[in-house]
Amino acid sequence: MSPKDFTAGTPKRLEALFERIGYQFKDVELVQRALTHASYGDGRRNTVDNERLEFLGDRVLGLLTAKLLFDQTKTKEGIMATRLNALVRKETCARVAQRLDIGSALLMSNSEDKQGGRGKTSILGDACEALMAALYIDGGYSVVEKFYNEHWREELDNVLNQSEKDPKTQLQEFALSKKLAVPYYYVKERSGPDHKPNFIIGVKVEGIGEAFATGTSKKLAERRAAKSLLEQIEET
């Protein structure tokens, strides 16, 4: 990116973004960099993109999420880890970016733009993290924390609701966050007539433990078994 790209004042696309995020950057060059995709400039050496800021933003996001979960929930470390993993995923960042219309403020190559780059999950997620790094550098921790608390609230509510409704998903995300194998479900016992069966289902996560539950369908018994194992995890 040439110097004039950064010194020509504040473009309208950025002014509109500043209004949406509720913060006026002092260093316009910094936020320009945060919104510059690697394709911009068609690979010229003097092009500065947002990859370094994305690296920092990923860590800032992790800290903010960990603090939020620590302050606002009373669950054990294992469940917090599962929820953190869901809140810092690229898909989550991309949804926040879409709500803020960050895509319209991005700089990218014409070819990437024509291929739908402004709507790609990976590009939006990276840009959102880079923007958080820019907020941290330009305004400090309190500024990026305010941004996070406002724009991640919906995501936190979704994670908490999903955790309550879908223990199988929660258990799988926990296992993945710990770099363990996915949960293994199996039928331990089946009884009753065909029109009214009863299942005992077991679920095992290597390195964590095993739990059993009953149900009139495999799906119901699996959910109950996953919930039972999650409760064991919370108690440890």
Image (spheres, rainbow, N blue to C red):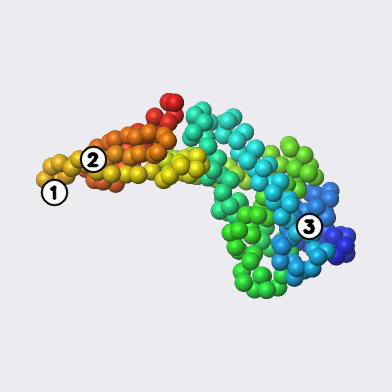
Q: Residue at x 52, y 35 (%)?
A: 80
Q: Which residue is mark 1?
A: 195
Q: Which residue is mark 2?
A: 188
Report the amino acid beneath label 1: His
- Residue 16 sits above or below residue 43 on the image: above
On the image, the x and y values in percent for residue 187 come to 24, 43
Mark number, residue 97: none
User: Of all residues shown, which one is farthest toward the front?
Assistant: 207
Assess whether mark 1 and mark 2 are in contact (beta carbons under 8 angstroms): no
Please name whichever residue, 191 or 106, is drawn nearer the observer in this view of the structure: 191
On the image, the x and y values in percent for residue 11 come to 81, 62
Drawn side of residue 99 relative to residue 231, left or right:
right
- Residue 134 sits above or below residue 81 on the image: below
Q: Residue at x 71, y 66 (%)?
A: 39
Label 2 neighbour load within 10 Å: few <14, some 14-19, many 20+: few
Mark 3 secondary-structure assignment? helix
Assess whether mark 3 and mark 2 are in contact (beta carbons under 8 angstroms): no
The alpha-carbon separation of the residues under discs 2 and 3 comes to 58 Å
Nearer to us of marks 2 and 1 is 2
Report the amino acid beneath label 2: Lys
Report the amino acid beneath label 3: Gln
Drawn side of residue 45 relative to residue 83, left or right:
right
Label 1 neighbour load within 10 Å: few <14, some 14-19, many 20+: few
On the image, the x and y values in percent for residue 125 come to 62, 54
Q: Residue at x 71, y 55 (%)?
A: 51
Drawn side of residue 210 relative to residue 155, left or right:
left
Q: Which residue is mark 3?
A: 32
On the image, the x and y values in percent for residue 82 come to 50, 39
User: Of all residues shown, which one is farthest toward the left?
Assistant: 193
Q: Quadrant of the C terminus?
A: top left
Nearer to us of marks 2 and 3 is 2
